Image (tube, helix red, strand yellow):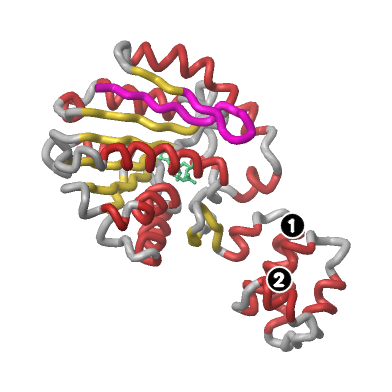
Amino acid sequence: MTIKDLLQKYKCKLDALDAELIIANSLAKSREFVLTYPENNITDDQLPLIEKDIARRIGGEPLAYITGRREFYGLDFKVNEHTLVPRPETEMLVEDALGLLRNALRNKDEDIVVADIGTGSGNIIVSIAKAMEDFKFEISNLKFIGIDMSGDALEVARQNAKAHGLDKEIKFLHGNLLSPILKPDIHNLGPGRLIILANLPYLSEDIYESAPKDVINFEPKTALYSPEAGLKHYRELFEQIKNSSVIRNLSSVTILIEYSPEQKELLEKIIPDFFPNAKSEFKQDLAEKWRTVKINLI
Ligand SMILES: C[S@@+](CC[C@H](N)C(=O)[O-])C[C@H]1O[C@@H](n2cnc3c(N)ncnc32)[C@H](O)[C@@H]1O
């Protein structure tokens, strides 16, 4: 059977792009190869494996779990059933963080820790560390940390950091929210600047229940759902920050989080309850939906 025959066979059951990418991935070739050489023969060994993957996709499994990869911020990331599939809208958090870091280059003597809470596949922190590679000697002490409560997700994040040559640059820590870095002196936090990034679970029960079947059936619920209108994780994070003596000793703290557009109003009310003196800046994404907030604490 040729590539063309196989594409023809599944034409009515599967999106052409998905079929091309599954075939390319199984043959360890690019999509361009599949499109350029439709007469290429698929061997009897290859065919059942490709058809098994095609059946998974027809069954609703996200393409990223079948190919084991997803592109994010121009980089290739390994993903699996323990990690969320990175979403394009999260690239905004990376952009926002890079804006802060480029500004920080003006004060080259400052120690800066960038902590990504709920790092998952490590897509956010790896993208930022990669983009800052050329500047790392300009900031005297720039540290990157990724935290997750899922040991399996952290394993994937470590592999992604290694694949991008950043395994020595990023420390991955296991634990609840910020707690792994809040123990005094353990990770040399302070007295410099801390940038906290978080794309924590934020789907309310209603939104989670109405999510597409491929999300509910295949992505980890622990990466998506949060009680209390989707904001329990962020409330807990704010509580940890508010009560931490380690954080009080820092010269500056900025929190950057991603949320669901309808949560903006609630966040506007909650943030001053935790941080009465903070300055918050809410931002919309390219589709003009509220997406991130930057909270400057000190
Ligand atoms: C929405 S996913 C984000 C994954 C990745 N950062 C991204 O942007 O695609 C949330 C992540 O937070 C982690 N998580 C959930 N609760 C946590 C907690 N209490 N402490 C640390 N990580 C947590 C989940 O395991 C998951 O990897």
Q: Where's residue 117, x and y in %?
A: 37, 40
Q: Residues within 10 Å of mark 1 (few under 14, many from 20)?
A: few
Q: Where's residue 99, x and y in %?
A: 38, 39
Height in image: 203 above or below 30?
Answer: above
Asked if residue 286 is among those painted magenta in the image, a careful observer would answer yes
Location of mark 2 (residue): 52
Asked if residue 102 is among those painted magenta in the image, a careful observer would answer no
Image quadrant of residue 181? top left
Q: What number is the disc on residue 59?
A: 1
**Which region is colored magenta?**
282-298
Front residue of 115 and 110: 110
Front residue of 69 and 209: 69
Image quadrant of residue 6? bottom right
Height in image: 21 above or below 227?
Answer: below
Look at the image and tell me in which quarter the N terminus lies: bottom right
Q: Tell me the residue at 55%/63% (across/down).
A: 68
Q: Is residue 219 visible to us here?
A: yes
Look at the image and tell me in which quarter the C terminus lies: top left
Determine whether the residue tagged by mark 1 lies in a helix, strand or loop.
loop
Q: Where's residue 51, x and y in %?
A: 74, 73
Of callouts 2 and 1, the N-terminal one: 2
Q: Is residue 180 visible to us here?
A: no
Residue type at mark 2: give it: Lys
Q: Quadrant of ligand 1?
A: top left
Asked if residue 30 lies left or right of residue 146, the reply is: right
Q: Residues within 10 Å of mark 2 (few under 14, many from 20)?
A: few
Q: Where's residue 184, x and y in %?
A: 13, 35
Q: CA distance from mark 2 to mark 1?
A: 11 Å
Q: Cβ–Cβ below 8 Å for labels 2 and 1?
A: no
Residue type at mark 1: give it: Gly
